Amino acid sequence: MVVYSFYIFDRHTECIYAKTWLPTSASSADTTTTGALTTTSAPRATSSDDAKLIFGTVFSLRNMVRKLGGDDDAFVSYRTAHYKLHFYETASSLRLVMLTDTATLSMRNVLHQIYINLWVEYVVKNPLSPVEHKGGAGVRNELFELALDQFIRSLM
Amino acid sequence: MASSKASRLGEEVWKTRMDKVNAELVVLTYGTIVAQLCKDFDSDYVEVNKQLDKMGYNIGLRLIEDYLAKSNTVRRCSNFRETAEMIAKDGGQVGFKIFLNIIPTITNWTSDGKQFSLVFDENPFADFVELPDDGRAQDELWYSNILCGVLRGALEMVQMQVEAHFISDVLRGNDTTEMRISLIRYIDDELPPEDD
């Protein structure tokens, strides 16, 4: 399993956290997937454009899913030829998005764990972190970033 | 969610997932805050109520995330009655149960289902408390007003704008401690800003 990138969007639709795990040179032997991903993401749009595109996509898909399947239905993931996008939304309108390779099974549980064990513990409960994370303020703290990186690496 | 399930959830979360602190520590800490506010604002109790509500609001904005994480809530409540039950439900609470281990009673619904009262049989904040005997505190100070703010902040994060205030308090000599909560509106999803 390979995790490519991870995004958090707040209830104001702003991307407050983005992280990419670039494929290491060792794994580039697997040219079909990693090769395709690096060529599409590296030279093209900036990362903030990526985040906006991703948010627009998941937001529309989520709304469409609810319209077709009722309010209880949830948009979970979609898959393309090159990657799979996983989506998790909390009742407080925090949206977690993760891009992985296509063979990965559902990451819903993983995203849920990130919310419970990392987001709530290290960001929300940090008394000095702001409530609103404008421009990512308060999210980029060492504990959260380290724990997230460790957690993701433990999955790979 | 069926009420028996909600009650089990509250009990289980309280028992297994919550770190506990000494109740007297909470009482004394909270009491100190109120006392300091009374001092800072020269016993302007209306202002003290306002400050407590504001503090509670800021707590609520964060506390809701812990609540959602601990109670494993994924689904929105489908109506305001269900919301009330997740805050406090007969025979085993969820919200108040897991944080304060108390069970307020839900009562006095209006017919449109948009207003209800929480009646507190016990209030851990108010142990040992006697309001100042200056002839005004009894009429003006809502000692536990922080709770109103907490509910307001927490519900705002799950897209409900509510108004909450106390209408009676045993500390003032009333028979019950009662908080009134009214749903003002559901907040719509925010849309991403238009590009280009």
Image (cartoon, coloured by chain):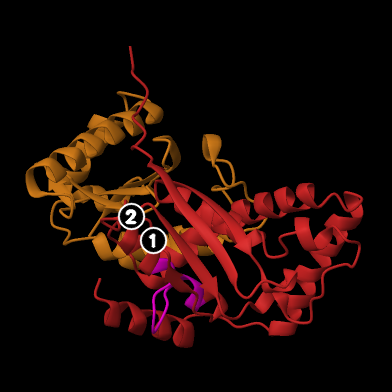
Against B67, residue A92 (above or below) is: above
What are the residue bounds of the magenta stretch? B86-98
Give the number of the disc on residue B101: none
Quarter residue B186 falls in: top left
- For image coordinates 46% across by 70% down, the residue present is B95
- For image coordinates 35% across by 33% down, the residue present is A51
Q: Residue furthest top?
A: B196
x and y percentages locating residue A108 in the rendered image? 25, 60
**Element carrying mark 2:** loop
Against A64, residue B1 (above or below) is: below
The chain in orange:
A
Residue A151 visible, this orientation: no
Q: Which residue is mark 2?
A: B113
Amino acid carrying label 1: it is Trp
- For image coordinates 19% across by 51% down, the residue present is A101
Q: Is residue B95 magenta?
A: yes
Give the number of the disc on residue B109: 1
x and y percentages locating residue A16 in the rendered image? 47, 40
Chain assignment, label 1 = B
Q: Are marks 2 and 1 on the same chain?
A: yes
Q: Nearer the viewer, residue B161 or B59?
A: B161
Q: Quadrant of the N terminus of chain B?
A: bottom left
Chain B takes which shade in the image?
A: red
- Crowd band around label 2 with a 10 angstrom C-alpha radius: few (<14), some (14–19), many (20+): few
- Crowd band around label 1 with a 10 angstrom C-alpha radius: few (<14), some (14–19), many (20+): some
Label 2 to label 1, Cα distance in Å? 6 Å
Chain assignment, label 2 = B
In the displayed structure image, the side of residue A36 where residue A130 appears, left or right: right
Quarter residue B121 falls in: bottom right
